[in-house]
């Protein structure tokens, strides 16, 4: 998961991602700045948005499978960005949009890459945990962690 942050991919000294990460053959989920890193690194375009979004937004889900499996047509989410992906990288498709952010989410199913401009990890994104759970399903990761196992392991 490539997480969010307040930087611009175009700013001097901004956080970058080694392009080799995208050659590892593993699923990747980009959140906010991570979404922009995916777009920028893989040949899309990231530009300042016409409207700076900070707060509640309604995202229109265009593909209700993959990371959006089980969600409704419109979802309340939390946005916090100025820059945004304005052109998809090759091989990606648009899967969600808002009034002010035409590429609110994108995916390349073949490579297992997903990018979302909003923050699923905050309580303001009503079904954010479902999105994260869907991504975990896509990765094939085993759901073995529990607080009880963690405590036992730490005590040992």
Image (cartoon, helix red, strand yellow):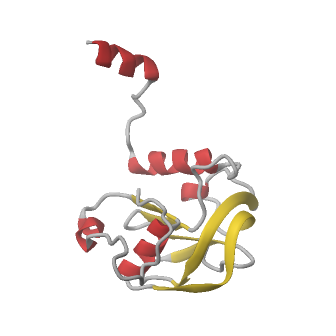
Residue lying at 66% horizontally and 50% vertically, measured from the top left:
70
Between 48 and 2, the one nearer to me in the picture: 48
Q: In the rendered view, does 100 fall on the left or right side of 135? A: right
Query: Could you tell me if residue 61 is visible in this image?
Result: no
Q: Find the residue positioned furthest to the front.
A: 13
Between 143 and 57, the one nearer to me in the picture: 57
* Position in image of residue 150 (x %, y %): 37, 22
Q: How many marks?
A: 0
Q: Give the vertical position of 47 relative to 67 (above or below).
A: below
Residue lying at 46% horizontally and 72% vertically, measured from the top left:
7
From the image, which quarter does the C terminus lie in?
top left
Q: Quadrant of residue 153?
A: top left
* Position in image of residue 102 (x %, y %): 65, 80
Between 97 and 2, the one nearer to me in the picture: 2
Residue lying at 76% horizontally and 65% vertically, measured from the top left:
58
Q: Give the vertical position of 156 relative to 24 (above or below).
A: above
Q: Give the vertical position of 42 relative to 2 (above or below).
A: below
């Amino acid at each position: 998961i490539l997480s969010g942050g307040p930087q611009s991919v175009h700013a001097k000294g901004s956080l970058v991602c080694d392009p080799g990460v995208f050659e590892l053959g593993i699923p990747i989920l980009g959140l906010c700045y991570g979404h922009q890193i995916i777009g920028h690194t893989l040949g899309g375009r990231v530009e300042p948005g016409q409207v700076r979004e900070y707060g509640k937004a309604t995202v229109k889900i265009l593909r209700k499978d993959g990371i959006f499996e089980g969600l409704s047509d419109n979802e309340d989410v939390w946005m916090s960005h100025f820059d945004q992906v304005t052109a998809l990288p090759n091989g990606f498709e648009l899967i969600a949009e808002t009034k002010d952010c035409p590429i609110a989410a994108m995916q390349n199913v073949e490579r297992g890459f997903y990018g979302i401009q909003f923050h699923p990890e905050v309580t303001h994104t009503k079904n954010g945990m479902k999105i994260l759970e869907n991504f975990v399903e896509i990765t094939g990761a085993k759901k073995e962690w529990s607080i009880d196992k963690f405590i036992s392991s730490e005590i040992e």
